[in-house]
Image: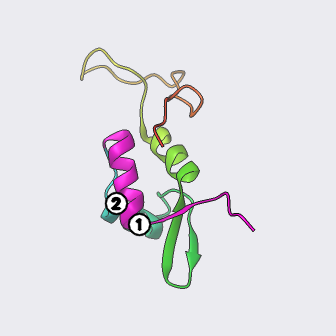
Amino acid sequence: MQLTTQFLRRDAAAEYLNKTYGFGAARTLAKGAVTGDSPEFHRAGRIVLYTREALDTWALSKIGPAQTSTSQRPTKSAAAPSIAEHDVVA
């Protein structure tokens, strides 16, 4: 039996987010798991496990639209990039 889903523990998930998107700390993931602002996760006993797909979806939801100035306010009609529009490095 071959598993197609690979699970990452919190530290490995944070490392993946940092290498792929340039943000995401293990403490952020831990706090988000309590507040509900985290990627979907699974549990194996006390161990929290993330899939790359869930991490990608969460990270992309955090990225706002392109801006040309720090004083520019994002518009409600502008959407963040989708997974299909983003080159995700696995």
Quick check: 6 above or below 59? below
Question: Is 5 within the magenta?
Answer: yes
Q: CA distance from mark 2 to mark 1?
A: 10 Å
Q: Secondary structure at mark 2?
A: helix
The location of residue 86, given as percent across then percent down, is 50, 29
Q: Quadrant of residue 62?
A: top left
Residue on which the image places disc 2: 28
Position in image of residue 9 (x %, y %): 45, 68
Give the residue at x 45% y 70%. 34
Mark 2: amino acid? Thr
**At 51% from the left edge and 56% from the top edge, which residue is drawn?**
39
Dot in front, 2 or 1: 1
Residue type at tag 1:
Arg
Magenta part of the chain: 1-22
Residue 45 image position (x, y, % from top left): 55, 85
Name the image quarter holding residue 14. bottom left
- Give the side of residue 75 with respect to residue 4, left or right: left
In the rendered image, the residue lying farthest to the bottom is 45
Q: Which residue is mark 1?
A: 10
In the image, residue 57 lies in the stretch drawn in magenta = no
Label 1 crowd bin: few (<14), some (14–19), many (20+), radius 10 Å: many
- Residue 10 relative to residue 56: left or right: left
Residue 2 position within the rendered picture, expressed as x and y whole percent measured from the top left = 71, 64
Of mark 2 and mark 1, the one earlier in the sequence is 1
On screen, residue 89 above or below 18: above
Q: Nearer the viewer, residue 53 or 58?
A: 53
Image disc number at residue 76: none
Q: Choose between 16 and 38: the one closer to the eye.
A: 16
Residue 31 in view in this figure: no
Question: Can residue 7 be spotted in the picture?
Answer: yes
Q: Quadrant of residue 41?
A: bottom right
